[in-house]
Amino acid sequence: MEWKLYFALSFAMFMEYAIWGAWFPVLAARLFGPLKMTGKQTGWIYATLPLACIVFPLVGGWLADKYVNTEWILVVAHLAGAVLLFLAAGKTTFKGLFTVLLLYSVCFAATLPLVNSLMFHHLAKAFSDPADVDAASGKIFLWAPVAWALAGYFLTGWRWKFKTGEQGRDCLYFAAVLSVIMAVGCLFMPKTPPVPASTDVVQAPIRDTLAMLGNSNFLVFVLASMIIAGLMQFYFQGTAQFMQDMGIPSKNVPASMAIAQATQAIATFFLLGLLLTSLGFKWTLVVGAGCWLLLYVIYIGTKEKLLIIPAQALHGLAYVFFIIVGQIYAKSVASAEILSTMQALMFAATTGVGLLLGTQLAGTVMDRFKSEDKFQWRQIFMVPAGIALVCILAFVLVFTAPAS
């Protein structure tokens, strides 16, 4: 692979997740803290991206598969997103913030599958062997957690220097600036036009992708992905406040949580190919889901900062071995004509329906186990732990997958 192509694809992956990582992990602390929102309101704020991801990844993937160059969709969506993030930083009411973040999420959701499909499209042209494509994609996927981690470390450094952590709106300004950089960079992406196909130009990609759900094994995979991904919302909505309640200063929370992404980057580079080769898709996915289960068990069983902080690595491992491996598996069963739409389906199922249900469940549970403005964290985290255990056992018994 030429270094220019590797740089371009890595840049797109890096910036997409730097934008997301700049605000998503830490905004909950602003909502619960300065804005005094309830768990249910926080759940709805965090539901804006999942709501958008139910439909708009499919719309973005369909447009890229049939009508518009992928790089131009990325440019327009990220420029619009930058404006909306600046507006969101100034909103202090639930209704105002929800409305603006929902509009922003429509833009961002459309871009999520396109970074993956752009990568797979150009790697397929560069390599004839699918194994080489998977190996090269791992080297590009690693920039996603690196970006998320660096965004967290930068935000922590910024808060140490400029004392902006108490209000917490700085994460939205930061994401807006990164969105502008992403949009400009996408102007120089390799051209990625729609793939010509002989089938119905309008309906074929979405129709053919949804037809995959008729395969019972693939349907089990999608449903398990939806449930496990949804449980991530207990991590995103709960961890920042949980850490602060356990005595970790708010200015240190972004860097502490970024341990997950540092671990994710290392695991993507050194372990992803190794586990897929030795365990195959099924058991690698089980390992990933099991890491989230273990993280919640640790949250339930300890109040020790020296255990809670390094345990963030489990989230990074889980993301690699469940979410990323799931995207690779979906790519392996998709034809070239539906590549973007297949990636969109996975984002719609996980980041869309899964996280939407997760936000509502997490918000409801956090409200239920809150007494005198204090969260009962042990009871809260028993819920995702129990659901994860049942889902993992069902997945082991029902799902079968070919070796990677």
Image (cartoon, rainbow, N blue to C red):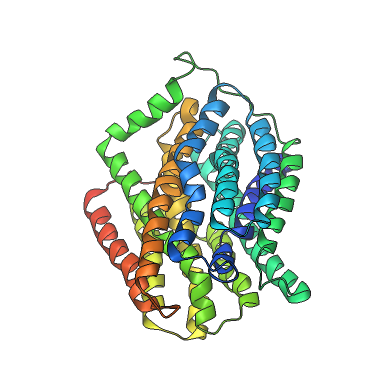
Dividing the picture into quadrants, the one containing residue 348 is top left
Instruction: Name above or below for residue 312 compared with residue 329.
Output: below
Q: How many marks?
A: 0
| Residue 202, x across and y down, in percent | 48, 18
Q: Is residue 144 visible?
A: yes
Which residue is located at x 39 percent, y 56 percent?
Answer: 360
Above or below, 197 relative to 327: above
Q: Position of residue 227 (x, y in %)?
A: 34, 53
The answer to whether residue 274 is seen in the rendering is no
Name the quadrant containing residue 169.
bottom right
- In the depicted view, which residue is nearer to us: 339 or 26? 26
Left or right of residue 223, residue 52 in this image: right
Identify whether 9 is placed above or below 70.
below
Q: Position of residue 162 (x, y in %)?
A: 77, 72
> Which x, y percent locates residue 79?
71, 40
Foreground residue, 281 or 186? 186
Please report the residue visible at 50 percent of the width from the left and 60 percent of the height from the top.
271
Q: Residue at (25%, 38%) from the top-left corner?
A: 216
* Quadrant of the frame with the N terminus: top right
Q: Is residue 121 left or right of residue 169?
A: left
> Which sits in the foreground, 76 or 292?
76
Q: Residue at x 65, y 38 (%)?
A: 77
